[in-house]
Image: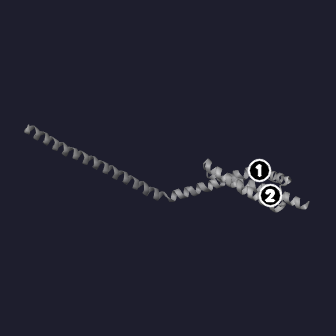
Amino acid sequence: MLNENEFMLHAFCMGIYITFVYDILRILRRVFPHGGFFVSLEDICFWIYCAVKVFLLMYHESNGTLRWFAVFGAIAGMVLYMKLASPFFVKYVSLLLQKIVGIIGKIIRFLLRPVRYLLRRMRERAVRAARRRAVKRQKNRELRRGILKKKLTFLRKVLKMDL
């Protein structure tokens, strides 16, 4: 009887642990939003991890046999954690992390100001150089057209004289 109570307590703690780990994933998703593919990939990895942890608990505590009171203990741990701690934990930790990430982002943007300025200046110079090359090409084309026109006019006049 004592072993079963201890097993139930371990299952209860496992339920709390699994829900806590998923809350960490929820917090990371709030702080660093990402697409459905990566959310699905995270969920698959999470459930594989949880399945291994639960299997190891069952293996060590009850020689691999499924005990329904352990399942109910894990569910009770999950529900209790979700009702009491999860809403506050996710809300406040994600807010704190968002503030920290925001401050770090502002610091990085401030430190990268000179780099952005230099990149902007280099881009402006590249655009000006490209425009100059385009104007030069256009002038060369017009010059070639003018020379070609003069040659054709000369050849036409020579042909008229010969006829």
Indicate the secondary structure of the residue bearing disc 1.
helix
Q: Which of 104 and 77 is in front in this view?
A: 77
State which quarter of the image contains the C terminus: top left
Colouring scheme applied when the structure was drawn: one colour
Precedes in sequence: disc 2 or disc 1 = 2
User: Residue beneath label 2, please?
Assistant: 13
- Name of the residue lying farthest toward the right: 1
Residue at figure coordinates x 19%, y 44% from the top left:
148
Q: Callout 2: few (<14), some (14-19), or many (20+) C-alpha neighbours within 10 Å? A: some
State which quarter of the image contains the N terminus: bottom right
Seen in the image, is 16 located left or right of residue 110?
right
In which quarter of the view is residue 66 placed?
bottom right
Identify which amino acid the numbered label 1 is placed on.
Met
In which quarter of the view is residue 67 placed?
bottom right
Q: Callout 1: few (<14), some (14-19), or many (20+) C-alpha neighbours within 10 Å? A: some
Give the x, y percent position of residue 155: 13, 42
Q: Which mark is residue 82?
A: 1
Give the x, y percent position of residue 115: 46, 58
Q: Nearer the viewer, mark 2 or mark 1?
A: 2
Indicate the secondary structure of the residue bearing disc 2.
helix
Seen in the image, is 142 located left or right of residue 9?
left
Q: In the picture shown, does residue 5 fall above or below 143?
A: below
Give the x, y percent position of residue 69: 86, 53
Seen in the image, is 69 located left or right of residue 40?
right
Q: In the picture shown, does residue 162 fall above or below 105?
A: above
Identify which amino acid the numbered label 2 is placed on.
Cys
